[in-house]
Amino acid sequence: MAEVKRQQAQKGAALLQRRWVLWGLIYACWLFIALFYTTQAGLQATYAGSSFPWWRVLRTELVHASLWVALTLAILRIDRMFPLDGGAWGRACLVHLVASILFSALHPLALVFIVRLFGWLSSQQPLWQICKASVVGYFHVNLTFYWGIIGVRYIVANYHRYRDRELKASNLEAQLAQSQLQVLRMQLQPHFLFNALNTISVLMTEDPRAANRTLVRLSDLLRMTLDANGKQVVPLKQEMEILQSYLDIVRTRFHDRLTVRIEVEPAALDAQVPSFLLQPLVENAIRHGVSPHARHGLVEISARRDGDTLRLDVHDNGDGLSEDGSGPPAHGMGISTTRARLDQLYGSAHRFEIRNDPEGGARVKLVLPFRTGDEMTDG
């Protein structure tokens, strides 16, 4: 209950502050107009070679401006009650038409009354003639002011609506991108799980003990995966731990046929990378570079910082890509999903290449912006 009251008090204070700001802006605008008219009249008098009562004209213009501050607030209130962009458009137009005529006539009468009250009225004409001359002199100007205030109000309102639409569209776009990233990320997990279970299924007939050890390692891997659930990016150190658990499962299947070399610079371990980034790349290298052959397979993984970028490299000693570059290593589900995730996360700020290596086999090169956890939070 106390928290609700505190929030209501904060909202009330914020609303009051916005009102004071609005009133201050309105008064500043009318003060500028008063100074503008005073200086204009003064310059005209100076140019004509006649004396000009600066103070008398300025004080009258200040009264004129103060009256219009009150009228402006009244006009805005009327517009809130009878908006021209509402459903009852005809009634609102009629109300504003009547109000503009009344305000345009009453303003000069009020001005004459205040000037006379303070003893500033120097004319010897009858009061009714002064009032008539004031209404005639100010009426069309005041009418322009009234509809000008209405026009500015709708320009500002339309601008705010435009900004709100832009903000909502931006938020929706960000939510859509986040949803797409989550879908892509979730595609990788069942894909990997299926392959891991398939490995365990094979081991159940060949080596039950190895199958049991693999199940234990798979449970550890799933636990780490759940710990990273909902996170699109994780430190490279955590990603390497997930990769090591995956490699422990793979080594159980390949025994001595597979060697994995990992070289990660300490400076690169804090870099933020997409979760489950390396596993599908390494899996692709093993499946297409090691599995099809009876010979010894080699997979090399490296990571290093290069200025403002993080460079990741996965290389295998298999047959490499087909000549037209359309072989499975370049277009498997894990690879295509990884490409899509990188496009969503980094746009054109990353590079992802799969090509044949001159020394043999296929090589995946990744260049990502180097960002730490603090930088990702700040961004």
Image (cartoon, grey):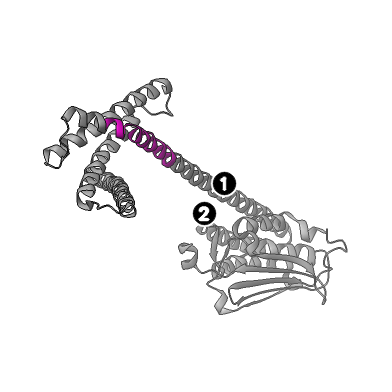
Q: Considering depth in this image, is 21 or 357 the residue closer to the camera?
A: 21
- The quadrant the N terminus occupies is top left
Closer to us: 350 or 229: 350
Q: Amino acid type of disc 1?
A: Leu
* N-term mark: 2 or 1: 1
Residue occupying the far right of the picture: 323
Q: Amino acid at mark 2?
A: Gly
Q: Is residue 150 magenta?
A: yes
Q: Which residue is mark 2?
A: 230
Left or right: 215 in relation to 296: left
Can you tell which mark lies on residue 243?
none
Q: Quick check: 316 left or right of 34?
A: right
Residue at 24%, 38% in the rendered image? 70
Which picture quadrant has residue 108? top left
Residue 257 image-quadrant placement: bottom right
Query: What element does badge 1 sit on?
Result: helix
Q: Position of residue 154 (x, y in %)?
A: 42, 37
- Would you call the spot at circle 2 few (<14 residues within 10 Å), some (14-19), or many (20 or more)? few
User: Which residue is identified by label 1?
Assistant: 176
Q: Magenta part of the protein: which range?
A: 135-157
Q: Nearer the viewer, residue 219 or 64?
A: 64
